Each structure stands twice: as structure tokens, then as C-alpha cells.
Image: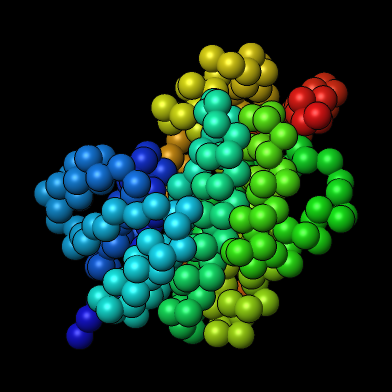
Amino acid sequence: MKKKVIVIIGSGGMGVAIARRIGTGHKLVLADYDKTKLDLVEKELLDAGYDVHTQQLDVVKYESVERLAETAASLGEIRTVINTAGVSSSSNNTKLILEVNLIGNANFIEAFQKYVTEESVGIIISSMAGHSFPSNPELEQQIKSANREEMAKLVQQLDNGNTIYAYVVSKWGNQLQVQSAALSWGKKNARIMSISPGTIATPQAKAEMQIHSSMRDMIENGPVKRFGTPEDIAGVVEFLNSPNASFMTGTDVLIDGGQTKYMQSIGRTMKNNLK
């Protein structure tokens, strides 16, 4: 009897923590753009006793994500699919931020929707930054209704050269994509959600801290005075992946140690940086 399959896109700190937390007894399928990093993580998990298959992919290319979905389905029934891949505002490439964060997730949702079954769970890693995007009903509807091809065109319109804007709108967009996908995934009795982490102790976050002094302020003065950890995120993933969360879908889980509310309480948000 084949094991059930857990797919994790992204072999960084969050991806590895999630794999260790929920991968026992399953077939783990790990994918990443960086083949060298993927090979290192594969060895680490194999040495720890996990059953691992790896596959290089480019989330921006639908054919690449589709091949991953096909591979995963050939290995067994898909239990969970998780996309941790993303590009932060520390990148100077607004096009890359928008493509990976928006087109990548559109590709993820469409490719895996074909193969999810009853009780399958999809999880996308968004960001607390998405909760800072100002109300824009017209753009909200555009994102919610866009298929992967329409999303590619929309990304071109959204690229105004502002890296903070690109990151915040893309993470807001991830939350909207999940809201929209919940209906189509629900037709197969599958669930899909997003998680919006706060400042997590990853190399990406440390790079951002060098740019944004407000991040240090959030950690030193917010309700929970520490970085989040990949294990904090893995714990929420474990819950969402369990029967205890079987009535949850189409929603976003904010796990930020109260950082978003703290910034709002002192009147500091990203809104002034979104122009």
C-alpha cells in the first residue's frame, strides 16, 4: 500500500521545519528552484529516516509545477500540498517578487487542484504584510477572479517599480487567491488556506531587517518580544492539516506575535510606502 503524499515547495527553514513536523509516515515530495540546497535538505531528511523524493522546479512556469503535481500523484494519494516559496521586499527585482508570489501561487492552485482528493489540504505561506494593504475592491475582484494566464497579465500592470508595494500587494493577493480557490477545491472535498507569518528568524527576514528599522521595533516593543521561528509556523501547519481544523477553509491565519496590531496601535503601517 502506497503512503500518502505530502508535497512541500521550498526547502528553506520553514519548509524543512514543516517536513520534520508532519512528514513522518508519509512520502515527502520536496521541490525547490535551488538544486544544490534541495540536495542538501534531501540528504538531511533521508539521514533522519524520512521517505523523501525531490524535484527541481520553477514556480513561475506552469509546466514545471504541473510536472511536480503529476509526479506527486504518481507516488500515492496526495494528502497535503504546501507552498512556502516566495520572494521578499529585500529583493530589488519587483518583477520577480510579483511573479513568484502571485503567478507561482496561481500555478500551484491550478496544477494541484487536479489531483487533490477528499480530505486533501492545501496551504500557502503569505505574510502579515498582506494585512497592511489598503482597501481596493476593484483590484481585489481582479485578483480573486484571475486564472493563471490572467494573473500573468495583471502582474505586469502591478509592477510600478516599488519593491515594498510589490511584496505587500502580492501577499495580500495570496490571501485573496485562497479565498477564491476554496470554492473550487471544496467541490473535491479538499480545503485550502493561507498562513501569514510575522517576523520569522530566517535569512530572508534578517536581510529585510537591514532595510526596515520598523522590524527591529516590532520585535523589541511588540506583545511577543522575539522573532517567530520556523517551528512556530510548522505547529500551525500541523493543526490546519489535522481533523481538528476540518471546518476551516478559504481563510488566512495570522501568526505574528501581535506585530501587526502593535504597528497599527502606534500609527505605523506600510501604507505610506505603497505609492
Residue drawn at the location 28% of the way across and 79% of the way down: 74
Q: Quick check: 250 above or below 255?
A: below
**Image location (x, y in percent) of residue 139:** 81, 53
- In the rendered view, tell whether residue 127 sits above or below residue 191: above
Asked whether the viewer can see residue 256, the reply is no
Q: Is residue 241 above or below residue 255?
A: below
Residue 102 place in picture, x, y as percent? 60, 52
266 relative to 36 in the view: left or right? right
Residue 87 visible (yes or no): yes
Question: Toward which corner of the image does residue 213 lie, by quadrant?
Answer: top right
Quadrant (top left/top right/bottom left/bottom right) for the C terminus = top right
Residue 147 versus residue 88: which sits nearer the camera? 147
> Residue 177: image x %, image y %?
66, 61
Q: Nearer the viewer, residue 234 or 189?
A: 189
Residue at 45 percent of width and 57 percent of height: 61
**For residue 220, which quarter of the picture?**
top right
Q: Pinpoint residue 60: horizontal percent, then vertical percent.
A: 48, 53
Answer left or right for 170 relative to 234: right
The N terminus appears in which quarter of the rendering?
Answer: bottom left
Q: Residue at x 46, y 49 (%)?
A: 84
* 42 sits left or right of 196 in the view: left
